Amino acid sequence: MSTRDSNFKVIVVGGGPVGLAAAHALHLAGIDFLVLERRPAIVEDKGASLIVHPHTLRVLHQFGVLEKLLPRGAELHHHLSFTAEGYVFKEGTQYAQIRQNHGYGPVAFHRSELIEIMYNDLPLAARERVLTDKKLVDIKTKPEGVRVSCADGSTFEGSIVIGADGVHSKTRQLMRKLALKTNPTRSWDSEQPYAATYQLLYGSFPSPSASGFGYDIQAKDKSIMYFSGPDRGWFFLYKKLPRPTQERTNYTDKDIEDVAQEFLEFPLTRTVKVKDVWSRMLAAGLTNLDEGIVEHWSLGRVVLVGDACHKMTTHLGLGFNNGVQDIVVLCNSLRKILNAAPNGNPSTGALTETFEKYKAVRMSSECSLKGDVWKSGVETRMHSWHNTWYYILSRYLVIPSWTESLVMRYVMAPEFRKGQVLDYVAKEEPMKGMISWLYPMKDLI
Ligand SMILES: Cc1cc2nc3c(=O)[nH]c(=O)nc-3n(C[C@H](O)[C@H](O)[C@H](O)COP(=O)(O)OP(=O)(O)OC[C@H]3O[C@@H](n4cnc5c(N)ncnc54)[C@H](O)[C@@H]3O)c2cc1C
């Protein structure tokens, strides 16, 4: 039975970058779907950059969007580390090494441009299945399917729900409610399963430097990342919170201004300071930098992907990359059980088993998720000299080029190498590079 002949329907909650990756992967698998997005438009010029690493470029290539995307991005090629006083203590080689190892360096995109291209490049029939102004408020599960309700009163029937609705996922909250309703004594993740030790002020501005810089600025309890693209520059100002928190904090414009004031004299490049771009900001936002992995990723016919089930700090730019990996692993197995089910409609039991296996794979050493959450947290703490040990590590130990070379080769490369691809889409033009050649990436021809 082909998935195209089945009446199986996936309801994806959230039209963010991972929800759109789901739309591409489901469309390519021939699985019917609907994406429900609470915002009035899919493309909004908010947010900063998204760095995409080589293993994700391969998946974007399978989606057919890579050719359009690459000219809009900036492959990172130059790295410097500064102190807050502007002293350059490191000229890193990591971007060149990633390119050498995997055939492509990390590419920085303006987040809304990446989303725009992913959305516009969906075939029309698939794009029409992405609905806006659809805020999920409830999920009812039945033995043979699900019924979701939105804030505007509309309801949709489907076979499963994929919750791609981000860090404060409503799907995750409703799943918790359903789980505790059926068994009030069972243990489940708390309503706020992540904790933040840092806050992050991010923003974009007309680029004050050449394209392709990826710089960091380090100080006690504060740090900055700066990236430059073809038109825009993006900064990320990190500040340690007075104490770790699980609370959801909604910051005001005054909070944004107050944090920015503390960084005005910090450098972004050798010649540009934060104060030089602050008056020319195109967009800015302040958020807590949540970290953690949720224990329960699914319940019956409901399953989570992306930030809804794992959250890492942004220093290594791996959150979206991991969301794409969730979609790849989930859609590869979903397609298989749909094809194996006699009428193309697997039972709740079979779906539950598939979702549990999906989480087990993503959490296993076959995938880089756990390592990515850990490494991202370490990098954040190194840059902000979280304690004496992180200070020594960042300022003195990971400095010589041979140390960095070892880290790239034996810590970062094996993780990228674990990147999986859709097993039902042609794997043309695999990424080439030394590491791929030495240890072929999983599933590469
Ligand atoms: C400043 C910053 C920089 C980052 N840089 C990088 C980077 O360089 N590289 C990288 O890989 N990752 C990066 N990340 C992380 C990355 O942005 C996230 O991992 C990624 O956006 C997760 O995608 P998502 O679709 O799961 O969630 P989101 O991007 O949060 O999208 C969720 C979507 O669901 C919608 N939604 C929410 N609730 C509902 C509801 N009730 N009903 C319907 N829709 C709903 C939201 O409106 C949103 O569109 C960065 C994060 C931040 C904050």
Image (cartoon, grey):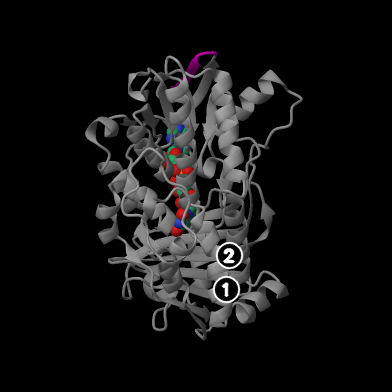
Q: Position of residue 164 (x, y in %)?
A: 47, 38
Per the model, the C-alpha gap separating discs 1 and 2 is 8 Å
Disc 1: CA contacts within 10 A as few (<14), some (14-19) or many (>=20): few
Residue bearing the label numbered 1: 406
Query: Magenta segment, which residues?
Result: 143-149
Q: Which of 391 and 318 is in front in this view?
A: 318
Q: Main secondary structure of the magenta part?
A: strand
Q: Which of 162 and 253 is in front in this view?
A: 162
At label 2, counting other C-alpha atoms closer than 10 Å, the crowd grade (few under 14, some 14-19, many 20 or more) is some
Left or right: 13 with respect to 173? left
Amino acid of disc 2: Val
Q: In which quarter of the image is the N terminus?
A: top left
Residue extending farthest to the left is: 124
Q: With respect to residue 340, does 133 lie above or below?
A: below
Q: Position of residue 354 (x, y in %)?
A: 55, 29
Q: What element carries label 2?
A: helix
Q: Earlier in the sequence, mark 1 or mark 2?
A: 1
Q: Nearer the viewer, residue 371 or 394?
A: 371
Residue 185 numbered mark, or none: none
Q: Mark 2 points at which residue?
A: 411
Horizontal side of 112 relative to 399 (left or right) equals left
Q: Is residue 167 visible?
A: no
Residue depicted at x 51% and y 70%: 224
Q: Magenta includes 144?
A: yes
Residue drawn where x is 53% and y is 69% of the image: 408
Q: Which amino acid does label 1 sit on?
A: Leu
Asked whether the viewer can see residue 30, the reply is yes
Q: Is the Cβ of the residue at disc 1 closer than 8 Å to that at disc 2?
A: yes
| Residue at image location 58% in from the left, 23% down from the top | 300
Rendered image quadrant of residue 344: top left
SS label for mark 1:
helix
* Residue 190, image x, y percentages: 68, 37
